[in-house]
């Protein structure tokens, strides 16, 4: 993890498993969520729900920068 993995599409189910596994492995886990400004509001709510279910208390929401948007577009 550590932010070095390339961006790729994922599902809420995959996030659920990832958040649960990583929070058990590292209780001090900090999650950074990058959101595109045109992303549906419901997607953000789903991600925040999964963070809460995994009992992760340290997270940040930030807008996706233009450079990240261009990289994500090539997926």
Image (tube, rainbow, N blue to C red):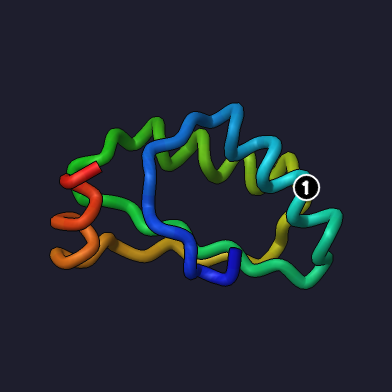
Q: Quadrant where the N terminus lies?
A: bottom right
At 85% from the left and 54% from the top, the residue drawn is 24
Q: Position of residue 41 (x, y in %)?
A: 34, 36
- Foreground residue among 14 and 40: 14
On screen, residue 67 versus residue 56, left or right, reads left
Residue at image mark 1:
21
Q: Is residue 71 left or right of residue 30?
A: left
What x and y, as percent, mark residue 49? 60, 38
Residue at screen point 71% across, 67% down: 29
- Total label count? 1
Quarter of the view holding residue 59:
bottom right
Q: Position of residue 31 (x, y in %)?
A: 58, 62
In percent of the image, x 18 and y 42: which residue is there? 38
Badge 1 marks a residue whose secondary structure is: helix
Left/right placement of residue 16 relative to residue 72 reads right
The image quarter in which residue 25 lies: bottom right
Name above or below for residue 7 compared with residue 59: above
Quarter of the image where the C terminus is located: top left
Q: Residue at x 33, y 52 (%)?
A: 35
Are there few (<14), some (14-19), or many (20+) residues within 10 Å of tag 1? few
Q: Position of residue 51 (x, y in %)?
A: 64, 47
**Residue sitting nearer the eye, 32 or 52:** 32
């Amino acid at each position: 993890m550590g932010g070095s993995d390339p961006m790729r599409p994922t599902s809420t189910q995959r996030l659920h498993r990832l958040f649960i596994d990583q929070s058990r492995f590292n209780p001090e886990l900090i999650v950074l969520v990058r959101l595109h400004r045109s992303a549906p509001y419901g997607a953000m709510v789903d991600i925040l729900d999964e963070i809460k279910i995994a009992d992760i208390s340290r997270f940040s929401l930030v807008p996706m920068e233009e450079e990240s948007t261009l990289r994500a577009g090539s997926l």
